[in-house]
Image (tube, helix red, strand yellow):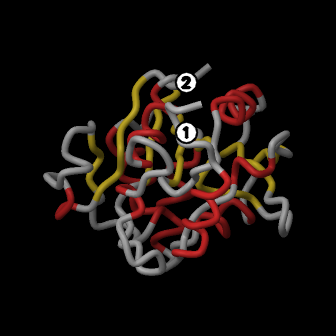
Amino acid sequence: MTRLHGLVLAGGRSRRMQADKAALSYGRRPQLAEAFDLLAAVTDSAWISVRADQTDDAIRGRFPQVIDGRLGEGPIAGIVAAQQQHPDAAWLVLACDLPYLDAATLDELIAGRDPARLATAFRSVTDGLPEPLCAIYEPASREPILDYIAAGSACPRKFLLSHDVRLLDAANARALGNANTPQDLAAARAALTPRGTA
């Protein structure tokens, strides 16, 4: 099986949240630290994806980094930058705004991985579409992603929809719930027991 690296996407501008999602806490630590540790525990090596202007900030500066390049925009820019850095590895890619994510869900994704497909992802419980930001991208996906970007496209979900991927149904569907707005933040904080205090 191909080496599996991990990537937490932390380069977003958090416009809807109106605060840096990587820095938000649902317990004792910033969400970026929680996501990175979950990922590092199940991959050979882990990095965070950042924009060039974020490399030295207080939250991101202490993590190994993959810096977005000039190819693509949004999450797909981080994915392709990681693939360019280590083209022979598969990448388990996570958004940094998944406060409900747990280790069991990542274990389930890895156990269901199909390296003969371009990617393995969970199916959304809301619309049945692929969840592109908790997914494994195989090395063979690199060239199709580059072609997709060259054609002017940037949505990783639409990429998965139009290519050969394996879709899994998560045992804990709540684990894939994200927090994009202040309302989502408040709901997640109300629902989650502060980490480290249970």
Location of residue 49 in the rendering, given as x and y in whole percent from the top left corner: 35, 51
Question: Mark 1 belongs to which amino acid?
Answer: Leu
- Counting residues from the start of the chain, the first of labels 1 and 2 encountered is 2
In the displayed structure image, the side of residue 53 where residue 168 appears, left or right: right
Quarter of the image with the N terminus in it: top right
Q: Quadrant of residue 82?
A: top left
Q: Residues within 10 Å of mark 2 (few under 14, many from 20)?
A: some
Residue 67 visible from this viewpoint: yes
The number of numbered discs placed on residues in the rendered structure image is 2
Q: Secondary structure at mark 1?
A: strand
- Residue for point 13% across, 52% down: 56
Between residue 153 and residue 127, name the one nearer to us: 127
Pointer 1 and pointer 2: residues touching (CB < 8 Å)?
yes
Q: Nearer the viewer, mark 1 or mark 2?
A: 2
Q: Residues within 10 Å of mark 1 (few under 14, many from 20)?
A: many
Between residue 146 and residue 123, name the one nearer to us: 123
Q: Which residue is mark 2?
A: 42
Q: Quadrant of residue 171?
A: top right
Location of residue 61 in the rendering, given as x and y in whole percent from the top left corner: 19, 45
Location of residue 69 in the rendering, given as x and y in whole percent from the top left corner: 27, 61
Q: Which residue is mark 1?
A: 92
User: Looking at the image, is 103 positioned above or below residue 76?
Assistant: above
